[in-house]
Amino acid sequence: MTYDNNNIFAKILRNEIPCKKIYEDEFVLSFYDINPQKKIHALVIPKGKYKDLDDFANNASNDEIVGLIKGINIVAKKLNISVDTGKGYRALANISQHGGQEVPHLHFHLFGGESIGKMVQ
Ligand code: AMP
């Protein structure tokens, strides 16, 4: 399956629909999830057109891969949930059909601000 240019996160990246932005740099955009599942629920997405983590691992440049991982850490620090605060958070990527992915643009969910509980419920 090719990348769907009309997915909702592609539209957010093109500024066609708004988001509650947390952070942006050359490699990533981060914004709040529209339907938060925890006190803090942020999303971090790469700017490149990647459907999921496998697509990203196979096709992204090393700079893009580093940029995404660093971006997650920067956002956690901005949200005051990073390990150095003594709190922590869960970073989670749903990958394709069996992974429960709904939006076909790679994204990491960051859950925090409270205890996140069991890994899979
Ligand atoms: P997933 O099931 O991993 O694909 O997660 C997709 C996430 O995108 C869900 O948590 C949705 O609440 C979230 N979402 C969908 N549309 C928007 C939007 N316009 N702005 C922010 N988050 C969104």
Image (tube, rainbow, N blue to C red):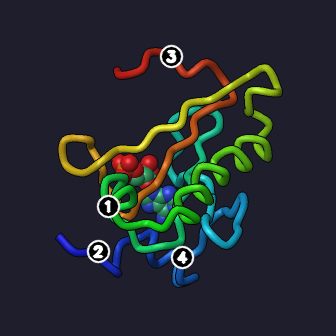
Q: Distance between the residues labelled 4 and 2?
A: 14 Å
Q: Distance between the residues labelled 1 and 2?
A: 10 Å
The residue singled out by tag 1 in the image is: 55
Mark 2 or mark 3: name the one nearer the start of the chain: 2
Q: What residue type is labelled 3?
A: Gly
Q: Which of the image's four quarters has the C terminus?
A: top left
The residue singled out by tag 4 in the image is: 13
Q: Looking at the image, is 82 positioned above or below residue 76?
A: above
Residue located 46% across and 78% down the image: 11
Mark 4 or mark 2: name the one nearer the start of the chain: 2
Q: Indicate the quadrant of ligand 1 in the picture.
A: bottom left
- Looking at the rendering, which quadrant does residue 106 occupy? bottom left
Q: Distance between the residues labelled 1 and 4?
A: 18 Å
Q: Looking at the image, is 111 positioned above or below residue 95?
A: above
The residue singled out by tag 3 in the image is: 117
Closest to the camera, between mark 1 and mark 2, is: 1
- Looking at the rendering, which quadrant does residue 116 occupy? top right
Evaluate if marks 1 and 2 touch, with contact meaning CB atoms under 8 Å apart: yes
Q: What residue type is labelled 1?
A: Asp
The residue singled out by tag 2 in the image is: 3
Mark 3 or mark 1: name the one nearer the start of the chain: 1
Left or right: where 102 falls relative to 97 = right
Check mark 4 vs ligand 1: CB closer than 8 Å? yes or no.
no
Evaluate if marks 4 and 3 touch, with contact meaning CB atoms under 8 Å apart: no
Residue 38 % position (x, y): 57, 33
Closest to the camera, between mark 4 and mark 2, is: 2
Residue located 66% across and 54% down the image: 71
Q: Which amino acid does label 4 sit on?
A: Leu
Q: Distance between the residues labelled 3 and 1?
A: 29 Å
Evaluate if marks 3 and 1 touch, with contact meaning CB atoms under 8 Å apart: no
Q: Distance between the residues labelled 2 and 3?
A: 33 Å
Crowding near the residue tagged with mark 4, few <14, some 14–19, many ≥20 C-alpha atoms within 10 Å: some
